[in-house]
């Protein structure tokens, strides 16, 4: 009888320690499959971003080569575009003032 009581107490203590161990954790049990799935999604997004960046840089380099071949380097093209914009803006102002005076 004493052995059965000891075994029962031992079993009760084991179950209490398991309950205590689970009760102290405030987080739900870890779902490894969910974490792995999230990691895979993150890896896939990272790879996609890296691929897109690589494609963008390749496109920009190709565009630069074409511009250099045509003699339209970035600095020249920007200066020309700014100058054309200024001229068009001035011309538009002149047209407006002429229309207002007539």
Image: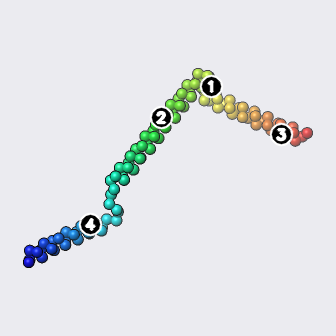
Helix, strand or loop at mark 3:
helix
- The disc, 1 or 2, on the residue closer to the chain's N-terminal end is 2
Residue 54's tag is 2
Q: 10 or 91, which is in the foreground? A: 10
Residue at x-position 8% and y-position 77%: 2
> Few, some or many C-alpha atoms within 10 Å of disc 2 (few <14, some 14-19, many ≥20)?
few
Q: In this view, does 97 lie above or below 61?
A: below
- The disc, 4 or 3, on the residue closer to the chain's N-terminal end is 4
Name the residue that disc number 1 marks.
Answer: 72
Locate the N terminus and report the quarter of the image it occupies: bottom left
Q: Position of residue 51 (x, y in %)?
A: 46, 37
Farthest bottom residue?
1
Circles 1 and 3, Cβ within 8 Å, touching? The answer is no
Marks 3 and 2, how far apart in space?
Answer: 47 Å
Residue 21's tag is 4
Residue at x-position 56% and y-position 28%: 63
């Amino acid at each position: 009888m004493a052995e059965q009581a000891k075994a029962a107490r031992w079993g009760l203590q084991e179950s209490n320690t398991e309950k205590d161990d689970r009760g102290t954790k405030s987080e739900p049990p870890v779902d490894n499959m969910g974490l792995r799935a999230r990691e895979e999604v993150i890896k896939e997004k990272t790879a996609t971003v890296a691929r897109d960046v690589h494609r963008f840089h390749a496109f920009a380099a190709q565009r630069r080569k074409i511009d250099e071949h045509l003699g339209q380097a970035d600095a020249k093209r920007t200066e020309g575009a700014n100058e054309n914009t200024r001229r068009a803006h001035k011309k538009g102002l002149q047209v407006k003032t002429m229309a207002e005076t007539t």
